[in-house]
Amino acid sequence: MFNKKKPVRHRSTNRFDTLISARTTIEGDVRFSGGLHVDGKIKGRVIAEEGSDAVIRLSEVGQITGDVIAPHIIINGTVHGDVHSSSHLELAEKSSVNGSVYYQLIEMAMGAAVNGNLIRQTETSGLLSHERAETAEPELESEGKFE
């Protein structure tokens, strides 16, 4: 009789399997599943295992120079790169993203900064496709003749 919607189930953000401390700098891509908490610096892409319900939390002292790709993302630090969230993205008051943000559901606190485009994704499939993110190149307008 009534259209009953299933309750939205969010992954618990209280459990983090991996911690990158404030005294740590990682150079290279980081691939993870489960929960990842970053207080340190990462110079490389941060990529959640495809098909997982992974969550990454970047604290206000944390910094990532590279793309961030995960279903659940909480940012309160600085990201120099694109952010791809297939489920839920939270930009806290001290967050700063220098790149485009691709999201399905977003929470943005007063004080959060995005220096790039906010792009809402309506499709869930393909958003976290590593091949798509690795091979995606911007389309350039060609000069001269068109074929």
Image (tube, rainbow, N blue to C red):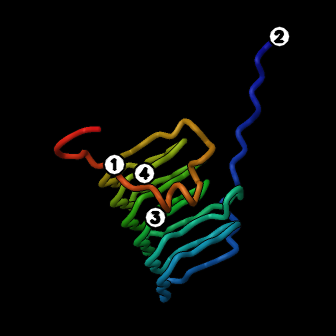
Marks 1/2 in contact by CB < 8 Å: the verdict is: no
Label 1 Cα neighbours within 10 Å, binned few <14 / some 14-19 / many ≥20: few
Identify the residue at horizontal 78%, vertical 22% (top origin): 4
The residue closer to the viewer here, 121 or 109, is 121
Of label 2 and label 4, which has the lower sequence position? 2
Compared across the picture, whether 104 is left or right of 108 comes to right
Nearest-to-viewer mark from 2 and 4? 4
Please tell me whether mark 2 sits on a helix, a strand or a loop. Answer: loop
Residue that badge 1 annotates: 139
Please tell me whether mark 4 sits on a helix, a strand or a loop. Answer: strand
The residue closer to the viewer here, 27 or 74, is 27
Residue that badge 2 annotates: 1
Q: Amino acid at mark 2?
A: Met
Residue that badge 3 annotates: 67
Q: CA distance from mark 1 to mark 2?
A: 49 Å
Please tell me whether mark 3 sits on a helix, a strand or a loop. Answer: loop
Label 3 Cα neighbours within 10 Å, binned few <14 / some 14-19 / many ≥20: many
Q: Quadrant of residue 18?
A: bottom right
Q: CA distance from mark 2 to mark 4?
A: 39 Å
Residue that badge 4 annotates: 101
Identify the residue at horizontal 34%, vertical 53% (top origin): 114
